[in-house]
Image (tube, grey):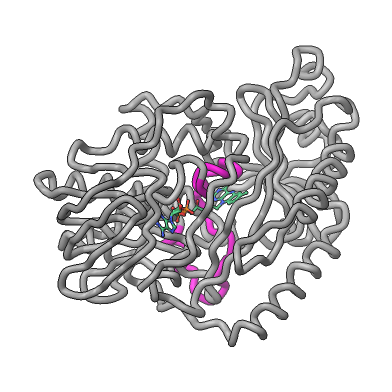
Amino acid sequence: MRVNSFPKNDRTNGWFNVLGEQPAARVFSGESKADWVIVGGGFSGLGAARRLGELRPNDRIVLLEAGRIGENASGRNSGFVIDLPHNFSQEQPEHDLRQIRVNRMAIAWLAELVERHQIRCQWSHRGKVHVAATRQGRKNLEVMAQRLTGLGEANEHWDKARLTAYLGTDYFDYGLFTPGCILMQPAALVTGLARSLPGNVEIYEESAVTGFEDGATKTLETAGGKVTTSQVILATNGWTPAFGFLERQLLTMHTFASLTRPLTTAEQAALGGEGDWGTIPSTLGGTTMRYTRDHRLLIRRSLRYRPDFTITDGDQARILGEHHETFAKRFPMIPDVGFEHTWGGVLCMSRNHVPKCGLLADGVWAAVCQNAVGAAKGTISGRAVAELAAGADTDLVADMTAYEELQRFPPAWITSLAFRARIAHAQLTARKEA
Ligand SMILES: Cc1cc2nc3c(=O)[nH]c(=O)nc-3n(C[C@H](O)[C@H](O)[C@H](O)COP(=O)(O)OP(=O)(O)OC[C@H]3O[C@@H](n4cnc5c(N)ncnc54)[C@H](O)[C@@H]3O)c2cc1C
């Protein structure tokens, strides 16, 4: 079959661009055989490649990535490695506890790799603050605080004075601090992870899989060559249906971020605050923010439903306008900073908020659908699918295979209508949170 939908790199990702000159991509060419082929070089694919390389040190493992590692969603995100669930399961707290357990395992694994391989990605144990500027936002956070307390998880209420001292801006009235989240520079982390994989993993970038033939022997075709194998791991996020799997079970949405240049010393003083930080909005249509260790401000706002993955110039212009508006409201003390970079990226979600980690067909495995929080979830999903495929019987495999199956979405036209309405509603009702 032709794989006719894969990401095309627009080279706009600020996190990647500020890394400076990167080594040229090694592009796949020729015809060869591999024991394993992993498609996708985000957190999920890199987690799978590392674990498989460890468990099968004598196997040839080929990883094919359509773009550059670090230019994908894994390098484009807001840089929160989150330990806690985003959606709490009221009836079944054991689901939340399992999510926390596997997320913390991912964080511990990543922390160890950052240390061992000296990955310079601004890895920072600063936790996260959920912030509210409206009464509804505050209500949402109070419910969240109750759930966290019920699960025995640490959380602190922060008032306006505490928030202002910590963040510099006095925009927010209510905050909920949780200590277990890590902040990082995502493109620096994923490129560092890719460069420190076991020696039997070969990475090829700018090598989109454009043809896939399933069977006892599977053939994956790129523009420059073909590789045959008996075992494939798809770590292809929202593009997985292009391989003929999980159709109508994944929903993709774009969201967008803008990054400033580093603030000058005078601007840092005008902003104030207590060092680097990360905030999460209290409503779906709200704004995520970061103040990085190298003194840049990031805002992540704006949602678009674009199932054909096309973002128009009109979209870009409106989004940039939204980001300027958000920045001006929160940071009136530094009006001349502006943005150096603005970009969009793809979130992949399932109807029942669960990932797909496991078998799709004979010899075809998946670690996909991280439901918008993939730094921890993708990493651990990739690790788990490698253990499962390699026949390792671990507690992690038991945890990750305990998820229910992905529910199907209604036909495309209904999903499209419903989802566009949901996004419009979220953006409209976000008000001061946006
Ligand atoms: C702006 C933004 C902010 C976000 N903020 C956060 C955050 O702070 N914390 C967090 O945890 N999550 C965040 N997310 C979500 C997170 O980035 C994703 O959940 C995560 O990156 C998913 O990882 P992945 O490896 O599954 O997918 P991806 O990173 O998308 O990797 C999939 C890879 O598959 C490749 N691929 C697809 N098709 C093919 C093909 N045919 N051939 C070859 N390669 C192919 C793609 O090129 C891509 O590199 C954010 C996302 C965005 C867009």
In the rendering, at what x and y percent does residue 64 appear? 33, 51
Residue 23 lies, in percent from the top left, at: 40, 28
Front residue of 91 and 396:
396
Residue 99, placed above or below residue 45: below
The reply, left or right, for residue 368 in relation to residue 225 is right
Name the one closer to the observer, 131 or 344. Answer: 344
Relative to 4, 274 lies left or right: right
Name, please, the residue furthest toward the left: 58
Q: Outermost residue toward the top?
A: 265
Q: Is residue 356 magenta?
A: no
Magenta stretch in the rendered image: 72-99
Going by the image, does 183 lie left or right of 54? right
In the picture shown, does residue 115 fall above or below 284?
Answer: above
Q: Is residue 194 above or below residue 34?
A: above
Residue found at x 84% / y 64%:
429
Quadrant in which residue 150 is drawn: bottom right
Q: Quadrant of residue 86?
A: bottom right
Which is nearer the eye, 414 or 300? Answer: 414
Asked whether the viewer can see residue 142, the reply is no
